[in-house]
Image (spheres, helix red, strand yellow):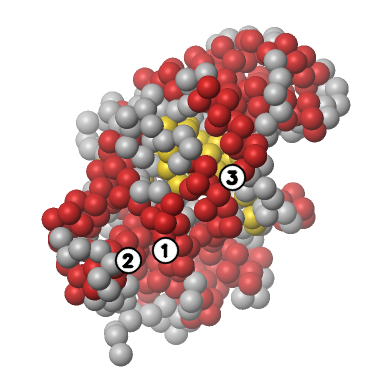
Amino acid sequence: MKTFLDQDFLLSNATAVTLYEQYAKDMPIIDYHCHISPEQIYRNQPFRNITDIWLGGDHYKWRLMRANGVDEAFITGDASDYDKFMAWAKTVPMTIGNPLYHWSHLELRRFFGIDTLLDETTAPAIWEKTNTMLQSDGFRPRDFITKSNVEVVCTTDDPADTLEYHVKLKDDQTFPVKVVPAFRPDKALRITADTFVPWLHQLEETSGRSIPDYAALLDALTARAEFFHEVGCRTSDHALDTVPYEPTTFEEAAAIFEKALKHEPISLLEENKYRTYTLVFLGKLYARLGWVMQLHMHAARNNNTRMFQRLGPDTGNDAMYDGQLALSLGQLLDTLEQEDGLPKTILYSLNPKDFPVLAAWMGSFQGGGIPGKMQLGAAWWFNDTKAGMLNQMQVLADIGLLSRFVGMLTDSRSFLSYPRHEYFRRLLCDLFGRWVEQGEAPNDMALLGQIIQGICYNNAKAYFQFS
Ligand SMILES: O=C(O)[C@@H](O)[C@H](O)[C@H](O)C(=O)CO
């Protein structure tokens, strides 16, 4: 019987071990999609305790605690940090089978040298040990990033954000890691949201431009994108929970924008016309800037009304849509391509049923002399599990080129999440190792090693071109 979480964890044969140890393990990390705070990186203040760094904001854990019957007071409520940690410790043994059981113990081992299994009996000692370490040198936000061999952190940022801390970090010679923004203009597309007009005023203030009409909005977004580029941005990111495609004109989109300013009702058709025109405009802008366009599709967000009203977004009350993507997404990509404005694009879906559809559609738009121009997004959110990652890689291998995949991301809000890359790299090496030992791939370690190192790092380095 294998020892739990041993050095060959997830590696089922000798070839897999060789591929991991000799090619994957020590490659730097380009974390091209995450939600950690650039301010927290810049200020680099100690964490209050293990609850602060491990449970604060991590809705993956919150969901499992709720499923385990933990009262909300011990999750997001007013319980003490110690009691919240104990509530998580009691839940952990019940998470066996979920990746959080692996990730939690990997994180304790990799950052704190603790190989004790976490449960309510071991929790008090782990609380004491981790908190002592968190108050000592080498356990601040920047330390977790550098200890993880991270080369680039790409955060998620609104065009109306000033990028104050990205600018400060860019000028900070004491921190070698690139911390760059991703341009995430979701609020520019949510024309029927109550937040739309207030957000416009925020954009006016940040951009220093008045936005009396739609043309001015597009100008302001362009100006902000160019500023983001100066700060090191090389990718956009969209939460396209559903993908619109309604052919329209600038004049129609402008008229719909005018209705939003006047708080007049906007129909679903009008909303999708506005979203379509704005997305096509932005896609061409990204292509001109040489950016990547990341489309995160089919997330069903904030489904629990009372919890959303109480806690806000990204608090563990999301799910996946089971609608259709192919037609509207295909029309959007084809419109951009016809106008020579299709950027490098990563197509994510939160519903794995979409993976073959996305892998097939992206194959219709490869080209431009760019290896892997069109990407099947990494196993995201509910899919960043052992089965989910293997499924995404197998579909990509079946229909496209796994060798050109730009690899994994943490997508996290916690500074302890970098072992997700290790988890992915182990699964990747085991997949190739099994192919070799089953005679489905040649035992050519130089070739396989080159492919593995491409997926772990080199492909993303060439694809994003973070300066
Ligand atoms: O980028 C997104 O929309 C999602 O990653 C979202 O932020 C979600 O809360 C998340 O963090 C899932 O890992």
* Residue 303 visible within the image: yes
Residue tagged by mark 3? 297
In the image, what residue type sits under mark 3?
Met
In the image, what residue type sits under mark 2?
Leu
Q: Is residue 278 above or below residue 3?
A: above
Residue 132 percent across, percent down from the top left: 32, 65
Label 1 beta carbon less than 8 Å to ligand 1: no
Within-10-Å neighbours for mark 3: few <14, some 14–19, many 20+: many
Q: CA distance from mark 1 to mark 2?
A: 8 Å
Local secondary structure at mark 3: strand
Residue 187 found in image quarter? top right
Do callouts 2 and 3 mark residues in contact (Cβ within 8 Å)? no
Residue 127 percent across, percent down from the top left: 40, 71
Q: Sequence order check: which comes first, mark 1 or mark 2? A: 1
Residue 464 found in image quarter? top left
Q: Is residue 151 above or below residue 225?
A: below
Label 2 beta carbon less than 8 Å to ligand 1: no
Q: Is residue 322 above or below residue 153?
A: below
Do callouts 1 and 2 mark residues in contact (Cβ within 8 Å)? yes
The tally of labels here is 3
Q: Is residue 362 above or below residue 223?
A: below
Q: Is residue 406 left or right of residue 7?
A: right
Residue tagged by mark 1? 390
Residue at 55%, 31% in the rendered image: 333
Q: CA distance from mark 1 to mark 3?
A: 20 Å
Residue 120 percent across, percent down from the top left: 48, 81
Residue tagged by mark 2? 431
Task: Locate the C terminus by quadrant.
Answer: top left
* Residue 157 visible within the image: no
In the image, what residue type sits under mark 1?
Leu
